[in-house]
Amino acid sequence: MVATAINRRGFLRVSFAAATGLLISLHLEPNALGQEAPTPAQQQPPKVFPPDAFVNIRPDGKIVIQVNRLEFGQGVQTALPMLLADEMDADWANVIGELAPAADVYKDPLFGFQFVGGSGSVAHSFQQYRELGAKTRAMLVAAAAERWNTTPDKCRSEASVVHGPNGKTATYAELAADAARKPVPTKVNLKTPSEFRLVGKHIKRLDSRPKCNGLLKFGLDLDLPGMKVAVVAHPPVFGGRVKGIVDGEARRVEGVRDIFEIPLANGTGVAVVADKFWPAKQARSRLKIDWDVTGVEHPDTTELWTRYRQLGNAPGNVAVNRGDANAIDKIAAGNRLVAEYEFPFLAHAPMEPLNTTVRFDGDHAEAWAGSQFQTVDQMAIAEVLGLKPEQVTFHTEMAGGGFGRRAVTDSHIQREAAVIAKRLRGTPVKLIWTREDDVPGGYYRPMHFHRVEIGVGPDGLPAAWRHVIVGQSILSGTPFESLLVKNGVDETATEGTSDTHYNLPNMHLSVHHPKVNVPVLWWRSVGHTHNAFVMETLIDELAQRARMEPIAYRRKLLKPDAKKLLSTLELLDKASAGWRNSLPRGHALGVACHECFGTGVACAVDVSVENKRPKIHRATVAVDCGIAVNPLTIESQFQAGLGFGVTQLMAKGAITLKNGIVEQRNFDGYTPPYIIDAPMTVDVHIVPSSEAPTGCGEPPVPVISPAVVNALARLTGKRYRTLPLTNL
Amino acid sequence: MATFQLTVNGERREVNVDPSTPLLWVLRDDLKLTGTKFGCGISACGACTVHVGGVATRSCIVPISHIGDRPIVTIEAMAGDPVGRAVQDAWVAEDVVQCGYCQSGQIMTAVALLKQTPRPTEQNIEESMGGNLCRCGTYPRIRAAIRSASAQLPKGGA
């Protein structure tokens, strides 16, 4: 591209062989600044592309920081620049966060590929971004010291300015060219928490204004010259194949360019390419496709439950075998509790429909996607097009939610887009999965059955615990299998129970992983969605049986080394004391706590029943996530993440199948929480900590649904063990 | 195909499209106003909300042939509207957005509410915002931002 070539000439590129790759680059092309929008509030600044560094200091003082993650709501586009800018002593008002394209230098420093997952963005890059900032600062100060014939220790930095002896000052923009020629220090001292200027402060998101004025471009908003739009007709049963296509009527829709069969990750489908979305969608609805669905399993939810219940009656592959596995058999029947739980398939249904744009030019391709798995998706596109990954320029687009749905090991969306782009060589094609493709399209949180037998000791505490989990393995058959599936146990099915912090001396946990013809995937907080529900409702029932306060019982049962849960329960106890014991008539308290992704969370809710549905009047949450990098983002993540967690309580919060066909097509059949369903108000309390930060993206999700049904149990006397909550 | 004369954000625009084309796709694909979002296509999520003749409308289900001479106002014009600006400022001050994809629709719905009812009760807020889905779940901050925008508006509305 010409524009790129011009911009690149303006870069003073700094190349060195440090493991972190390029550090500083300088934008010296004044014309490029002329293209800039009048105010940042009105328009997004032009992207530095291709970026060849983490930090780009522009002559106008703007500091562009590359974010090695997808931003899809979690606030990482603000948090990672905060870390770097703090150590760099950059002027925050002039910091811009950009989503980096797929490149080796932007891979996760711990896992070696570029991704968002496991609530690890800040946790994994905390040290990395701070070091990048400290090194950049050291280079800028060294340049200033040299200019003033002094030594770096005689200089200090603040708000993008270096101050030297005798009142000398120089801005980072003035120093950048010299700094870029300095050697990159191998070792730098990082700030102590008391020296932080940004970290730990309530810093507002960098992307708010463009998300409020409609000017921020998501992947779906991409518009390229000559671009076409594609939709795909998918088989009614997973793995089905096209037997015949009658497309005469579809081809008559004005604006339709091509209709052809394509391979899918599972089976085949029919692609429709048009000038714009509406003709593509109209044409698809006029296709007559004869599908071959013989030879593929037709799963049926009712039959699956029967099968899962049968499996749950016997132990499976052993995940935990601690103490006396048969202790339960020695406990009198009257002191035993047997509980069976059902959790349905759940769709992620992010607000922005899934999409990917690809242009194939023969020996190179360019792709645009809001991807949680840039490395994996780039490789998949390359494979389809017969290219090497580095021949695919992969742009990370802002994404409208994801919750795991944009981290797909088989890259099925990107593969579909690449196959279509290959046929339309030279033309950019935007593939859109409509909501009717997404909701019945698979890649769900797997359905699970749990059977738990508990023997209660004379002290009211669980003396024996026998637990069987039945559900598809998410990771079998994926590149993650060797890492997370051990002895036939997929850790993503047992997490939250197998690693429980409650003192369960005699515990047996086993799992069955049936094979079912429904693609499954991680759904925000993964196994914790169902395991926290089971554990926290059972613990609550045991507390009630023991006639103990729910917070007190949990504190008693937790192991002394469960520091984060104990600290959050203590904080929750204080923070909710004002309302917890003086609830209005018809309201009840519900409590739950859970630790996942290294973060402890405790939650108390005030619930009543309105129109046969739970009304969550308020929630108080206590969080221990180590150093709170941006307390404002953490607060927001927890406030909103509780609402997301309510998905599994919704009356229509389930994906079901009948004779192989998914019964829900859109938000009318699969209905996530609206404003009336989510907590009305949420106050978040963060445990002060100087430990390394842990995740905040997923930990808000697991606690809310058990807390709410624990409150409902106090109101109605019923224990709710089958989700979704269809009847109260 | 047919030609339609539209008034969008105060400007006269002409488009040549199939009469069945929903207003949403005319805005996005023909007029390149991509601030209005596609979420479901069945008026169930509110991401596509615009004002048609001053009324908050789901643009994904309104065929362009049904618009007539009613003026269309989208999120792109809100910075120039006193109530729109107050709502956007409140959204930024309250740090409402997360992924942000639904927020154009949320803001358009909130602006319509505040133009009608400058001092809404919690029940007014729940009723008016009740059909706008936010998968991130930013609802508590949406409530707070509507209250704070309301406090910035003159009593009789703008």
Image (cartoon, rainbow, N blue to C red):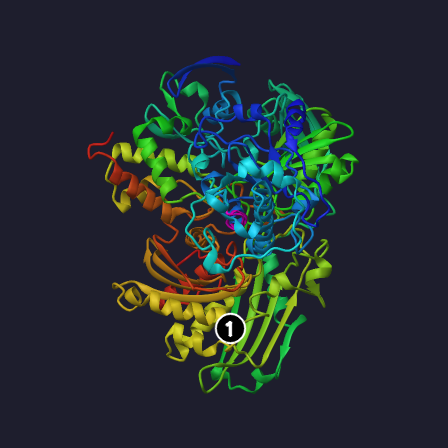
Q: Position of residue A368 (x, y in %)?
A: 63, 35
Find residue A390 and report its horizontal and vertical position in percent.
74, 38
Which is nearer the eye, A174 or A154?
Answer: A154
The residue lying at 54 percent from left, 57 percent from top is: A525
In the image, residue A601 lies at what x, y percent?
Answer: 46, 63
Residue A393 image point, x, y percent: 69, 35
Classify 10 Å Cα crowding around label 1: few (below 14), some (14-19), many (20 and above): some
State whether the magenta stretch is mostly helix, strand or loop. Answer: helix
Q: Is residue B53 magenta?
A: no
Q: Residue at x 49, y 68 (%)?
A: A564
User: Which residues are the magenta region?
Assistant: A83-89
Residue A88 lies within the magenta run = yes
Return the residue at label 1: A562
- Tell which residue pokes out farthest to the left in this image: B156
Q: Can you tell which quarter of the image residue B157 is in?
A: top left
Determine which quarter of the picture holds residue A688.
bottom left
- Name above or below for residue A36 compared with residue A355: above
Picture layout, residue A152 above or below residue B61: below
**Protein chain holding label 1:** A
On screen, residue A451 above or below A136:
below
Hey, what amino acid is under mark 1?
A: Ala
Location of residue A247 by image quarter: top right
Residue located at (44% from left, 74% from top): A554
Q: Is residue A106 visible?
A: yes
Does residue B130 appear in the picture of this structure?
no
In this rendered view, identify the residue nearer to me: A185 or A34: A185
Horizontal side, residue A427 vs residue A595: left or right = right
